[in-house]
Image (cartoon, helix red, strand yellow):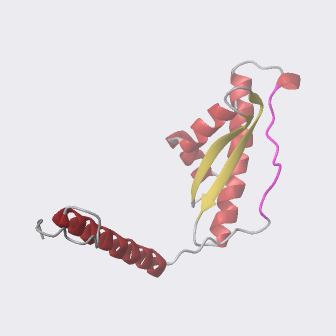
C-alpha cells in the first residue's frame, strides 16, 4: 500500500488532487522501508513527504493538502477493493517539522566550486601533458646522451 500510495501521489492524478485540496508548491513522496535486501521489512512502510517552496505558508498549505490527500486516497482505494473497515490500512503521521526548514544555497558558492574544479583540472591536464612530453615522471633529470 505504501508503494502504491507513493506512485499515486507522485503521478498526475496525485498532483491534481493535491492542487484541488489547496496545495500549490512542488512536492515529492518517497517510500522508505526498514530492513535490507536480505531481510526486507515491508509490514510497516514509511512514506516521506517533502514540499519545496520559497514561501513558508505555501509549504504548510501544500503539506496539509498532501497529508489529507494521502489519507483520503488510501481509504477510498481500499473501499473500492472491498476491504473490511477493521482490516483497512491507515496512515499515521509519525513526525513532522513544526516550521518549514529553510535550505539555502548560493549561486556564488556553486560558481566558486566550479572555478576551483576547473583550476584543478587544468593543472592536472598540464602536469599530464608535461609528463607525456618528457617521457617520464615530472621533474626527472634527462639522461646524458638521451632525449631531452
For the N terminus, the image quarter is top right
Nearer to the camera, 115 or 58? 115
Task: Report the residue at 69% width, 34% height from top.
Answer: 2
Type of secondary structure dominating the magenta stretch: loop
Q: Residue furthest front?
A: 144
- Find the magenta span and give its range: 88-97
Residue 60 drawn above or below residue 123? above
Position in image of residue 123 (x %, y %): 31, 73
Classify the position of the C terminus by image quarter.
bottom left
Q: Is residue 79 visible?
A: yes
Q: Looking at the image, which is closer to me, 97 or 56?
A: 97
Q: Which residue is painted at 81% across and 54% down in the image? A: 95
Residue at x-position 68% and y-position 45%: 69
Give the side of residue 128 with respect to residue 52, left or right: left
Residue 60 % position (x, y)? 70, 64
Query: From this viewpoint, which residue is outermost toward the right?
Result: 86
Q: Position of residue 66 (x, y in %)?
A: 67, 50
What is the number of callouts on the image? 0
Instruction: Indicate yes or no whether the magenta region holds residue 93.
Output: yes
Q: Position of residue 80 (x, y in %)?
A: 69, 23
Q: Is residue 22 visible?
A: no
Q: Is residue 39 magenta?
A: no
Is 139 placed above or below 64 here?
Answer: below
Question: Eyeballing the image, is 7 above or below 121?
Answer: above
Residue drawn at (58%, 36%) of the image: 7
Nearest the eye: 44 or 67: 44
Amino acid at each position: 500500500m505504501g508503494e502504491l500510495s507513493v506512485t499515486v501521489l507522485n503521478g498526475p492524478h496525485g498532483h491534481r488532487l493535491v492542487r484541488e485540496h489547496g496545495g500549490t508548491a512542488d512536492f515529492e513522496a518517497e517510500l522508505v522501508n526498514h530492513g535490507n535486501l536480505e531481510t526486507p521489512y515491508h509490514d510497516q512502510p514509511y512514506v516521506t513527504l517533502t514540499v519545496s517552496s520559497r514561501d513558508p505558508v505555501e509549504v504548510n498549505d501544500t503539506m496539509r493538502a498532501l497529508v489529507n490527500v494521502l489519507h483520503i486516497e488510501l481509504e477510498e482505494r481500499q473501499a473500492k477493493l472491498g476491504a473490511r473497515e477493521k482490516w483497512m490500512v491507515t496512515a499515521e503521521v509519525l513526525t513532522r517539522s513544526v516550521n518549514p526548514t529553510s535550505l539555502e544555497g548560493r549561486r556564488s558558492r556553486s560558481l566558486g566550486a566550479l572555478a576551483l574544479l576547473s583550476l584543478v583540472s587544468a593543472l592536472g591536464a598540464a602536469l599530464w601533458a608535461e609528463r607525456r612530453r618528457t617521457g617520464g615522471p615530472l621533474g626527472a633529470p634527462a639522461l646524458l646522451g638521451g632525449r631531452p
